[in-house]
Image (cartoon, grey):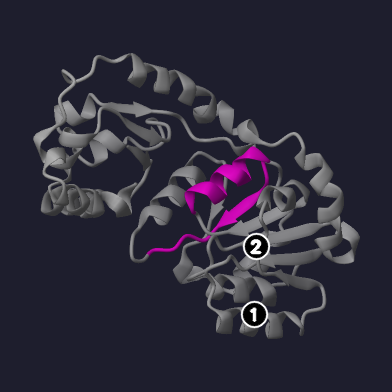
Amino acid sequence: MGLREILDDAEAVRREWEEGDYTSAIRAYYDRIWVYGDRSVYDTVTEYGFPEDIAQRVRFTGYLNPLDVADPDSKAERWDFDALLPEGGSRPLDLCLVGGGRDGLRLAEAFVHAMKPGIGVVVTGPLMPAESRARLRALASQHPRTHVLEFVTNPCLLLERADRVVAMAGYNTICEILAYRKPALLIPRTEPRTEQLIRAARFAALGLTDMLHPSDLTPEAISAWLTAKAARRSAPEEVMDFSGVRRLRGLLEEVLAAPDRGGETPHAVREGPRVGSILGSLEPLV
């Protein structure tokens, strides 16, 4: 089973796992739990109070560096991608990322209104409602140096060119920002889970990013950060484990080499219908 390093605040996760009896499902169906993070950044086992037998199945992979799975053929893509960038990819480029975009309108609007040293690009994400995208495009039309892209299949190509990044604090987004060592201001969501708030605070404490609480989000706050000429950050490898992709092969070999359970299918699996209900209860966590 694969887990993000942070699921929610500790009390909420402990309560949810207890109510759903998730530990029983893990005991029945999973031999290993891969946590895609660094224990020194967030100790998932301790924070969420995993029982000892569950804790023994946990392996911290390290954070997943997207550059470790980069397609070498993507260089050909870059030439076509330049045409998407406004003003021919001129610098400086300030980038706003709102993850899937479902709840990213408020951040995107604040970014559009903000004073920017160069050109600004907002990627709305595929889940932003159509009416929100239309509202954002109309707003951007009043700011000629700010542009809206509705979807980008490979955001790393944009990140590679960006000078500064304003973003939410989803797992993938932060890993991509850190991979390219971009100055970043994180504005995390706080509902329905505090996962992003905890993550943003941890990385800000490590000095890898800056954080703005969403209650303090204004165009003026973003303007102040963008015009402060934030410096390029230290390599993330200096303060945390960022080698998760490279470690996965060894972890998989560990699972394959482990003795089986006597070749017998667990009773719960043989029952059939119960499997879907138990695994369904785990779905939000994996």
Q: Which mark is residue 96?
A: 2
Say what secondary structure mark 2 lies in. Answer: strand
Q: Amino acid at mark 2?
A: Cys
Please tell me which residue lies in front, 106 or 114: 106
* Bounds of the magenta segment: 170-190
Q: Is residue 112 above or below residue 89?
A: below
Where residue 240 appears, as percent x and y from the top left, is 50, 30
Q: Is residue 193 left or right of residue 271?
A: right
What is the three-letter code of the residue carrying label 1? Leu
Above/below status of 198 relative to 1? below
Q: Is residue 189 magenta?
A: yes
Label drawn at residue 178: none
| Residue 57 appears in the rendering | yes
Residue 176 percent across, percent down from the top left: 60, 45
Residue occupied by mark 1: 136
Quarter placement of the N terminus: top left
Left/right placement of residue 88 relative to residue 110 reads right
Give the Cα separation between the discs numbered 2 and 1: 13 Å
Q: Name the residue: 62% across, 85% down.
A: 135
| 279 relative to 192, above or below | above
